[in-house]
Image (cartoon, grey):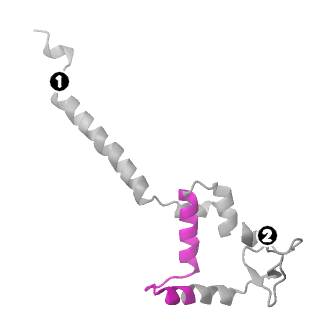
Amino acid sequence: MKSIALHPKNGTVDAFYLRPKKIPCSDVWYCDSPVGIHTIQSTVKRLCQSAGIIGYFTNHSLRATSATRLYQAGVDEQLITEKTGHRSNAVRAYKRTSDAQQASVSSVLHSGSKKHKLEELVDTSPSKFKQ
């Protein structure tokens, strides 16, 4: 990942988002300090406005979307927890199904129901033939 390679080599801060250097070197673009909370909060609003996205979106919107997409991509839950900053299994609340996953389940259930209906219509039990 290119961004990680541009972090300080022996950084002491355990933060996902680091503050960019005012004058980046060719191999290190980020300071060994986290981005400020107000910077992150205003970034979401600013990005949505410049993209023309209408609605109320927060950092939590990004956190939830990120966790959901990571789950759908098959990323290990422990890694998702580390990247989203969760300290418990609360991250599982973001384990949402995609439209493709829901369509797959619907297809399985729909095809299964036809089979059961057919079996109900055609009664081949031995008791019907003994008389």
Residue 30's tag is none
- Foreground mark, 1 or 2? 2
Up/down of 10 relative to 55, above or below: above
Q: Residue at x 64, y 54 (%)?
A: 76
- Which image quadrant for residue 131? top left
Residue 27 in the image: x percent, y percent?
A: 84, 76
The amino acid type found where label 2 is placed reads Ala
Residue type at mark 1 is: Asp
Say whether residue 9 is left or right of residue 47. right
Q: Which residue is mark 1?
A: 123
Look at the numbered disc 1 and give the secondary structure of its residue. Answer: loop
Look at the image and say whether residue 58 sits in the magenta stretch: yes
**Residue drawn at 36 percent across, 53 percent down:** 103
Residue at left offset 51%, top offset 85%: 48
Using the rendered view, name the quadrant where residue 119 is placed. top left
Q: What is the x, y in percent for residue 93? A: 53, 63
Residue position for label 2: 5
Q: Residue at x 20, y 32 (%)?
A: 118
Neighbor class of circle 1 (other Cα within 10 Å; few <14, some 14-19, many 20+) is: few
Of the image marks 1 and 2, the number of the one nearer the N terminus: 2
| Relative vertical location of residue 97 with respect to residue 47 in this rendering, above or below | above
